[in-house]
Amino acid sequence: MQTIYKNIIKGLIFTSLGFGCGDNKTETSHKKFVITDSFLSRLLIDTVMQANGKADIIFSAKITANEDRKSELFPMVSGSVNRVNVRLGDQVNAGQTLATVNSAEMAGFDKEVIAANSELKTADRALKQAEQLYESGLSSAKELEEAKNDYQTKKAEFRRANSVLKINGGSSTGIYSIRSPLRGLVIEKNVNENMQLRSDNDKSLFTVADLSNVWAMISIYESDISRVMPGAEVNLSTLSYPEKIFKGKIDKIYNLIDKDSRVMNARVVIKNPNFLLKPGMLGTVKVSANSKINLPVVNARAVIFDENKNYVIVLKSDNKVRIQEIEIGRKTADRIFVSKGVQAGDRVIASKQVFLFENLKTQ
């Protein structure tokens, strides 16, 4: 099959420039290779660019919820779960009831409010009576002052009892309501109906997160720390959406190096209006970083490695091709910085180049 392909490719691009005959002597034929327009249209051509002090660095990334827009909800009282109104992955609004709990503690809070309100009314009547007696000269200023102080104390107690009731759901029926403090998605749920709860439970019942923007957490190796700066623009690609690129910026670099892995963490803020990115997803982040290298750069796909040397196939302005050996100054995952062999503006073939190389080097 390879022989057939070689014959076809030769018929398309190889043009013999001449043969000469003498007395029993044959001159060696010299062949140059010209790519026809029809064949050229099927090839991928890359242009050599100048790095200009920039280089792309690739990092692995893990999507997490924005911690500034996430809330973990714990039970404030003990009791029995009466009803769960949402499921994992549901979108909820701020103030929406996620679950209700039958709680004796809630009934106790309501009782405290009722008692405090009754005592406040009694203190209010006593204060009005003390004011009338003082104006009539039948009581002293001290007695009036004591009545005022008692009223202020009972008023403060009533406010405290109401605040406690409000913090714990504000119910006067012994029902404790767990409400979402923000608009977002339920990304964690650890509660079911009829579950018994304790107020000292250290595990959240719900976690609600606003996923309109998310974080991509990346790990930077020591050798790259000086090249990555806050505010740098990045491109995020994921396994779930391989054809889609998500734009973002490095929001924070954590100035601590893990003693075992020798990496420093950084976070990237990614806009996520359609909630395509989910916490736990894996991806790669490409960062355009600062570099001292100012060399011509080619896409790694155009480089051919053969017998411990590196080559590219250069396409000249007249559509003739030649094999060009290059020396590599530096390389990344998808780019090669060339210290010798090509210049910015040169065109190189980036598809079927290995097959062309094998045919060209044997001529």
Image (tube, rainbow, N blue to C red):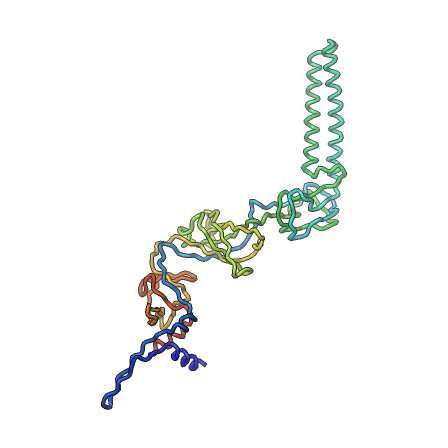
Residue 23 x/y as whole percent: 23, 90
Q: Position of residue 121 (x, y in %)?
A: 75, 24
Residue 151 occupies which quadrant of the picture? top right
Q: Quadrant of the N terminus?
A: bottom left
Image location (x, y in percent) of residue 136: 74, 9
Residue at the top extreme of this rendering: 137
Extreme front residue here? 37
Q: Number of labelled discs?
A: 0
Q: From what the image shows, is residue 344 above or below residue 268?
A: below
Closest to the observer: 109 or 212?
212
Q: Is 227 located above or below residue 199 in the figure?
A: below
Above or below: residue 161 compared with residue 264 = above
* Residue 354 pos. (x, y %): 40, 73
The structure residue drawn at horizontal position 42% and vertical position 68%, both measured from the top left corner, is 44
Which one is nearer the viewer's eye here, 44 or 212? 44
The relative height of residue 144 versus residue 223 in the rendered view (above or below) is: above
- The image quadrant of residue 276 is bottom right
Left or right of 328? Residue 86 is right
Image point (67%, 44%), residue name: 96
Which residue is at the far left?
A: 23
Which residue is depicted at the point 61% across and 45% down? 71
The answer to which of 338 and 117 lies nearer the viewer is 338
Farthest residue, direction bottom:
24
